[in-house]
Structures are given as structure tokens and as C-alpha cells.
Amino acid sequence: MTALGWIAVAIFVGVYVLVATERIHRVAAALGGAALILALGIVKSEDAFYSRETGIDWDVIFLLLGMMLVVGVIRRTGVFEYLAIRAAKIAKGRPYRVLVLLILVTALASALLDNVTTILLVAPVTLLVCDRLGLRPIPFLIAEALASNIGGTATLVGDPPNIIIASRADLSFIDFLVHLAPIVLVILAAFLVLSRFMFRNSLQGDPSRTTALMALDEREAITDSRLLVRSGIVLGAILLGFLLQRQTGIAPSVVALVGAGIMLLISALKPRELLVDVEWETLLFFMGLFILVGALVHVGALELLAGQLGNLTGGATGPTLMVMLVGSAVVSAIVDNIPYVTAMTPVVSSLIDTHPDLGANGGLWWALALGADLGGNATIIGASANVVVVGIAVRNGLHISFANWLTFGIPTAALSLAICIPYVLLRYG
Amino acid sequence: MRARDLAQSIQPVQPDEPLATALLHMVASRLPGIVVDTPRSLMVIPASQLLRAVLPQYVQDDPSLARVWDEQSADRVAAALADRHVADLVRAVLAEDAVSTAVVDGDATLVEIATIMAEARVPMVAVVDQGAFVGIITVNHALEHLLG
């Protein structure tokens, strides 16, 4: 590798450290690094902005943007608040049943929406339910963050790493449903059982307080029933568009953008109101990362890494799948999984090019997705949803410590991994 | 007229005062907010933002939950005030960026005062003359003089 190549590696590592340590804002770090890469001429503007291999992946950016706009309309209908309160009432206020149903609502919502949005919607209503039932809300909040990371793993749009993997590996929505959704259902079922034991000390309720819960009128949460029906139909059409991607040849990003446009037309919301819901910071962070990773591809650094990884495992399918699955889980527990997956996708591509067996049925891609998505549950900083739920807790006068999270996060991540290992080996090994 | 001539004398609230006492005093005095003497500066908190101290944070985070709240449980909201101090309110409004410094100099003219009220979206301003707090001017008081 050339001297310029090593400079690109140094810039990427520097940005990674800055993002991990939060010394400066992650957008500033990613865009600053990308600017340096461009200014030094390591990649040219045509590589950064127009190349599919070494530039910004606009499919990812516009799929995220489209889904953010779609969710921006749906969240305003109050349907998630309705579902969460209804679930708690169906559970008749019994703590474990309430926990189970809230976990299921969160996991299901998270499969369709991104994890952070799901938490922002479900956490406030959980605090209300716990307040009424006199329950400690912290276990419920932690369980929901863990469930959102599990549920998000199931679909192409559930977690940003999946969107990146889908675009780079040309995997469809159905591929994710076929390969990831079944194992996610197993993990979710196991997590429900684990929750019974992990949170047992916090699931003692006062039956006399059930009346206070039943007094809540969940129908009042629906702000606009007409919009709810219309946006439900559009969301259904979007999902259908995702499912028929192979037949229609229309990319998910286009489906999401068309859906977002229709949502805008039917919602009567002013674009300015809806644009507030777009996480511009996330989109800019992605753009910076794509340029940084593109530079590593351009200088051959990731091919080198793929070669090293191939040598380490001898290109044997089983060991490589395990290194990818477990390694991704460990890395994602410590640092943001978005930059990790962005950097790893070219490595996986290169490994599959060299050892085609690794690409059979997309095995190596699924190992990367499962490890990166589920490893984040282990620590408080492992996933964006974890960070957000801790922030919501603090605002409501509750404290979730790093150690407190580990008590629940490590068993959940370990259990998920223990289920994924035989699944990946048996199905793809 | 200058701000110092219009100022209506009141006692600023101290951060360690019980919140319920400060709110009851504001209601009894028919003022549109309170002036808190924080260690860093004077802070004008409009009455509408004082509600942040009364409402549970999760309802402020998701206002649609206010709609599901049953009338019989309204007293739960007031219970949130117990054991809370003015300093808690200051922290809450600062965290929400829900307040701006609405303090004018004693020399400020009516137009200056009105402009600050409009910009900061506050119904009253605190007047400081030669470094000392001298009182407040409410929007009604300012309008009386502007229109009269």
C-alpha cells in the first residue's frame, strides 16, 4: 500500500476513535475526515459522489430519508401510543404480561421503523403505564431497547446496518425475511423467557392499581383516524413495494421516496413540519462515512484486511462465519455499528470474491448483520436505541448506570449469539 | 419613559424556595411569570413554561399522552410538585431551551422593552439598573404606555 493509502487508514482510524470516544460530534468527525480525504486528493470528487464502489451510497441515504418522512407522518397519528396502552390493558396490568406485550409491540414496530424512533415512541407511554401501575420503569425501558435491537434485525429497514448490507450485497427485503426473520423470532421468544428471570425483582405489582391503568383512554391517543387509515394504506403499499423488489426492479430507496411523497400529499402537513423529523445528522454522518470507507477501498486497505482475515481462517467457511459473527458482535458492543458495517461491507465483498463458498446463500452477509445488530445490546453505548433510552430515563429523573445495563445487556447479547452460532453454522456452514 | 420608571417592584424568587410556594405567590399576585435570582443571572420564566414543572416529563415528550389522561387522575399532576424546588424548574426550562434571558437595562426605552418581549416570547421582563434588580414590566403595563 502507498504512503497515501496509510494516510487514508490513519484518517479513518482517527475518525473512528473520535466517534467512539465522543470527543467531538460524530457528524463533525465523519465530515471532517471526508473533507481531509478529498482535500488530500486520496479520492476525487467523481469517486466520492458518483462511484457506486467508492462513493456515497445514495440508495442508502434516500431509503433512510424516505422512511424518516414516512415515519414522521405515522407517528403523528398516535397509533403507537394506542397500541402500547391497549397492550398494557389487555395484560390487565399484570407486570410480566405487560412487559411481554410491550416487548412484542416494540420488536414489531422496530422491524418496520428504525430503532431510535421506536424507542422515542414507546418509552414515554411505558413511563405512563409504569406510573399508573406503581412499577419501576427502568427494567421496562431497558427491555424495550433490547427488544428494539432484536426486532430491528429482522428486516431490511429495521436497522441501518441492514440497509447498508442490503444495498452493498444486493439483497432484497424478502431475503432478509427469509434469512433473518425466522432466527429473530426464536431470539425474541428466548428473550421473553430470559426477561422473566432477569427482571423478576421488578415485576411485583400492586393489583389494586390496575384501576388507574384501566382509566386511561387509549382511543384518545389517535389524533387523526382518517390520516391513520390513509397512512396505513400507504405503509402497506410501501411494504408491498419492498416485497416485490425482484419482480418490479424498483429499488427500496425509490419505493420509500414515492411513499414519502404520497404521505406528504395525504397528510396536509407542511413540508417544513415534516422535515423536522428527518435526522439530518444521521444522513450527513452516513455521507461522511461512505467517503471515508470509499477511500479505504480506493487505496486497497480493505482488500488487504480481507486478505488477512482470509489467511487467518484459511478461507474455511465455518471459521470465517464464526469470526465474522462473533467479531462483529464484540466490536458492535463497544462502538457504533454503523461505521463498523460500512467499513466491513467491502471486506465481506472481497472475501466472497476470493472464496466464493463464503457467499453461498449470503452466509457471510447474514453473519455480519446478526453480529453487528445484536452485539449492540451488550452495553449502554452499543446501540443508538440504548443511548436514547438512557437519555429519556435521565430526563424523567431515573438513572441507568453502565453496570446496571451490563446486568441485562450481556445475558441478552450472549443468548442471542448462542442462538445465532448454530443457526449460521447449520444453515450456511 | 425608561424601564426604571415603569418597573413594578417585586421580590425575585430564590432557587431554594419550594416550588409550590413560588407558584402560589405568582398566582396570588396575578403575575404572568416569575423572576428567579439564579447564581449566574436573573431569569424570567413565563407562567406557561412553569407548567413544565407540573407536567410529567413523559407527557411533555409525547403530548398525545395528555389526551389519554383521565380527568379523575388530574390530581396526580399536582402531586408532582411536592418536594420540588425552584432550582428544579430552572433546570427543566434550561434543558428544554424554553426560556431566554429577558432582562433590560434601566435606560431601556418602551420600544426596546417591547422588542425584547416579542423576540424572547415572554410576557414580562426584569429591569436591572446599575447592576441591581429594580422590578419587572409586564406586557400589559408596557402596552398601556405604548397605546396610551
Image (cartoon, grey):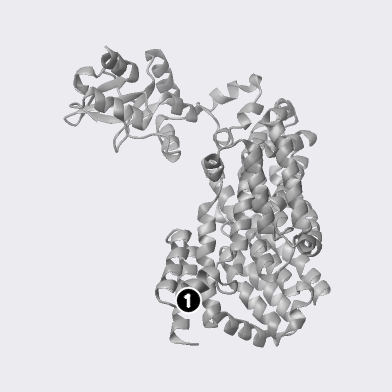
Q: Does residue A221 appear left or right of residue A38 in this picture?
A: right
The residue closer to the viewer here, A79 or B55, is A79
Above or below — where is A135 with respect to B9? below
Residue A121 visible? The answer is no
Above or below — where is A161 with respect to A99? below
From the top left corner, tell me how far across and down residue B138 is, in percent.
32, 19
**Circle 1 residue:** A43
Q: Which residue appears at 48% of the width and 26% of the height?
A: B51
Residue B9 visible? The answer is yes
Provide the secondary structure element on which disc 1 rests.
loop
For the view shown, which residue lies furthest in the top direction? B148
Badge 1, how many Cα within 10 Å: few under 14, some, many 20+? many
Q: Does residue B22 appear left or right of residue A282 in this picture?
A: left
Q: Amino acid at mark 1?
A: Val
Q: Which residue appears at 62% of the width and 52% of the height?
A: A66
From the top left corner, tell me how far across and down residue A195 is, in percent.
74, 51
The residue closer to the viewer here, A149 or A339, is A339
Above or below — where is A45 with respect to A277? below
Q: Quadrant of residue A255?
A: bottom right
Q: Which image quadrant: the C terminus of chain A?
A: bottom right
